[in-house]
Amino acid sequence: MRRLQPVAWSKGVFLSPQHLQAQDHFVEDSLRFIVEATSFRFWGFRLLQVDATAITEGSLNLLQASGFFPDGLAFDLANADMPPQSRSLDDCFEDKKHSCVFYFAIPESRSAGINIGQRGSGLSTRFYPELQMLRDENSTGIEKPVSLARKNLKILAEGESLEGSLVLPFARVLRTEAGQYQLDREFIAPMIDANASESLTSILRSLVEVMISLSGRLAGVRRQRNQSLADFSASDVANFWLLYTINTHLPVLHQLLQAPQVHPETVYMHLLTLAGALTTFSKRVLPQDLPKYDHMRQGRCFLALEAILVELLNTVIPSRFLALPLRQLRDSVYVADIDVEEDTLKNSRFYLAIASELPTAELIARTTTLVKACSATHLETLIRQALPGVALTHVPSPPQEIPVKLSFEYFSLDRAGAAWDTIQRARNIGVYVPGEIANPRLELILLPPVGTKPRG
């Protein structure tokens, strides 16, 4: 029951404990009402640290914990409250029990009962009195004893009665077949700051890293219209929307990862929005099937959503081409291994992309007359004996499947003749680019027939 009625103070009122208690309840319930009405799930841990070393020794201790119980009661073990008594794990595990959840607990507030009781009285009260010497801050500084209400904090184990207590699950302990105890790293307590949970931070960081990598890969297959504008063809529509989806959500998630404090629900809603958008590219996952946020069981919902996002992000729309960068073996000689399946090698169209500091017309003319291509193993013989290599034909408008890059010119390779046969047998290619073509950049592109995709 909420107590939102203030005490009717008036002249001559005989002051009693009930007056002050009623005023305290009015202030506390009013603040709680405001917080509940203006924020979602304000309760949980702001800071949490379990002694992992003590667990291996058979004891459960809380090193640090701060936050709010579901009724708004604040706690801070590091600076204000005494830590609860540690628990012996042997007493909490039955013979065949392999895991146990532990709860940070305090007795509920009784609106019509006793909330402060002496220790050892047999009553499980919310507080117990503790005398402290307090100094008068405004006069002589004389100390006097004041009875303060110390929180009756406890650690309860799964299977024990939780009735009459406010609880926050904070750890799951596992027992191995060898009888050793260890902390379950997949368990996530209800947090109000995602940065306070190593597990939540790790989930967000790994997803951001995957998105950065995928964004770079998708951006690399865009055609270039000019120095500042990318171009997409009709066949690139799916890649365009996937890249758009990732680039729309990536800055927000990256910002959340860098934020000094962020509520887990905020992180979850942004991840959920990303997952919903990515279901556009999936036949298996439906947006209405995505897991809902569960503040009390954050580990369950975050891990389930992470698994779905990893699956969706890994379902990349395949490219219709295969790009093989040519590495410089020595001056004027560039080579690449063609590590693809036999049918891909036989049936694909091959294109050589080349860029240089030369003017376009001069680059085209010199490439078709001076550049030689055959297998890397036969290139020296080809150069020494001045034999012709694979014929190169300039392609002013490359196929739409190829991501055209600015300043590059594209040449098709004639898949016939002795030089081409050496490439097929050796499954590699060597390209000779003489010094007349300064600072060349080379790339070999394979384009399989329509209806197939490159398989390496």
Image (spheres, helix red, strand yellow):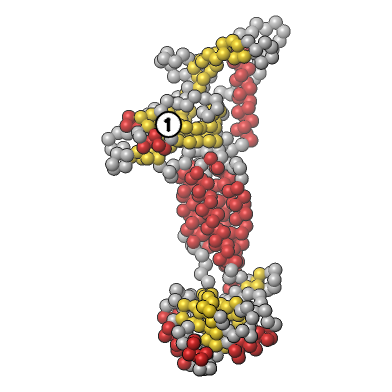
Tell me where residue 13 appears, x and y as whole percent.
Answer: 67, 7
- The image position of residue 1, as x and y in percent, is 56, 23
In this view, which residue lies farthest toward the right? 11
- Residue 407's quadrant in the figure? bottom right
SS of the residue under disc 1: loop
Q: Nearer the viewer, residue 417 or 117?
A: 417
Q: Residue at x 63, y 83 (%)?
A: 437
> Which sits in the foreground, 182 or 39?
182
Residue pictured at 41% horizontal, 14% vertical:
120
Q: Residue at x 55, y 85 (%)?
A: 432
Residue 329 visible at all: yes
- Rendered position, 79 above or below 186: above
Residue 406's x, y, as percent?
66, 75
Indicate whether 226 appears above or below 246: below
Residue 356 in percent (x, y) is at: 64, 79
Residue at which label 1 appears:
61
Left or right: residue 376 versus residue 262 is left
Is residue 289 visible in the rendered image? The answer is no
